[in-house]
Amino acid sequence: MNYLRNCWYAAIWSDDLQPGHITARTLLDEPLVFYRDAQGAPVAMEDMCPHRLAPLRLGKLLPNGHLQCGYHGLEFEASGQCVKNPHGQGRIPAKCRVKTYTLVEKHTMVWIWMGTATPDESLIPEFSYLDAASGHDVGRRDTLAMDANYRGIVDNLMDLSHAAYLHDGLLGNEDTAWAEIEVRQDGPYVYVQRDMHNVRPPKLRDLLFKRDGAPVNMWQTIRWSAPGAVLNDVGTYAVGSDRSNFSGQLGCHILTPETATTTHYFTAAARQGPIGAAPEEGDEAFKAQIAEMRRYAFKEQDDPMLKAQQDNIQRHPHVRPVLLDIDVGPVRCQRILDGLLAEEAAAAGTETH
Ligand code: FES
Ligand SMILES: [Fe+2]
């Protein structure tokens, strides 16, 4: 599988990378280990010892911050350099080092750069609502293991009309199938906005709004940047009222390919808007309920559909999908991604010639 490499991928939530623990995770088909060094800085290394190729995830973190291979005890520092060979004369061959990747912690998440170009921190997508400084009360930070390729999930997210059927009752219903759709682009971001008027509120929206089941107006403004960083801004307001008087959520859906057919899906939501927030602010049980509804929708409803769809696509590689009006957003994103992949392939070609 061809992956975009000169870009930032979400690797792990900062909170999930606790000092003293080694986390093994495959990104872009590459098995990696993540840990924190003695200063607490995150480290990412290839999960393979240069000696006999044993996986480093079976090793140990030493109090000095070195990672010790679990097989014959070679020790590596955060740069990947072997710094101790406990055998023989202790000679360390020049090639005895592990490949490492640049990491940056931002928006409560560890981002990884797996390309050959110089990492550019300014390219990390904007998810500042996740920061403590934003004042948002962010719910559970989930990492969902999806059995689908990330590009299929991009199609799923950039056309939220599917909520009317696949998440019927929970995130959408028949009333929400039709919407005014606007697709626009701003710098690296593609936005798809759906406006729905006078619709029965789906369960999650009603819970976050007035809990009276009365018809509402709703919007979804979903933002994508390559390769798979998605921010969804949703709001609900009363029919006949001003849209500034709303209740909604900001939710991230950040996709990192694990393999060609599986994806790490990072998601967390925060409430927004002046309505409905006060009684539940900081209410952990309510926040957990909302997080669980979201997890259920993405993992138990989207994922089986995406997996089964992917199986069909693999079985019929030459069949082109029939496209509808609702596909304008997803098609725009995939074209941009294809362009970036082609650019990167061309640049890699010039490097090698
Ligand atoms: S395989 Fe790692 S020290 Fe031998
Ligand atoms: Fe969905």
Image: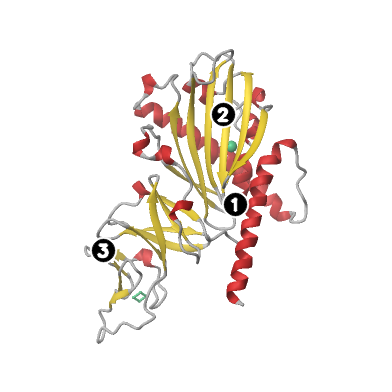
Near mark 3 (Cα within 10 A), the count class, few <14, some 14-19 or many ≥20, is: many
In what element is the residue under mark 1?
A: loop
Taking the image as drawn, is residue 1 in sight?
A: no
Q: How many marks?
A: 3
Most foreground residue, 69 or 336: 336
What amino acid is found at the position of numbered circle 1 in the picture?
Asn
The image quadrant that residue 163 belongs to is: top right
Taking the image as drawn, is residue 176 in sight?
A: yes
User: Under 8 Å from ligand 2: the CB of mark 2?
Assistant: yes
In what element is the residue under mark 3?
A: loop
Give the distance between the C-alpha atoms of the residues marked 1 and 2, in whole angstroms.
Answer: 23 Å
Sequence-earlier tag: 1 or 3? 3
Sequence-earlier tag: 1 or 2? 1
In what element is the residue under mark 2?
A: loop
What's the mark number on residue 65?
A: 3
What amino acid is found at the position of numbered circle 3 in the picture?
Gly
Q: Residue at x 38, y 32 (%)?
A: 136
What's the mark number on residue 99?
A: none
Q: Residue at x 49, y 58 (%)?
A: 27
Which quadrant is home to the C terminus? bottom right
Q: Residue 350, percent across and down?
A: 61, 72
Query: Is 243 above or below relative to 90?
Result: above
What amino acid is found at the position of numbered circle 2 in the picture?
Leu
Name the residue furthest front. 187
What's the mark number on residue 171?
A: 2
Query: Is 13 above or below relative to 210?
Result: below
Q: Quadrant of ligand 2?
A: top right
Residue highlighted by disc 1: 149
Q: Residue 130, percent across and down?
A: 40, 39
Q: Residue 317, percent across and down?
A: 74, 56
Q: Residue 264, percent across and down?
A: 50, 50
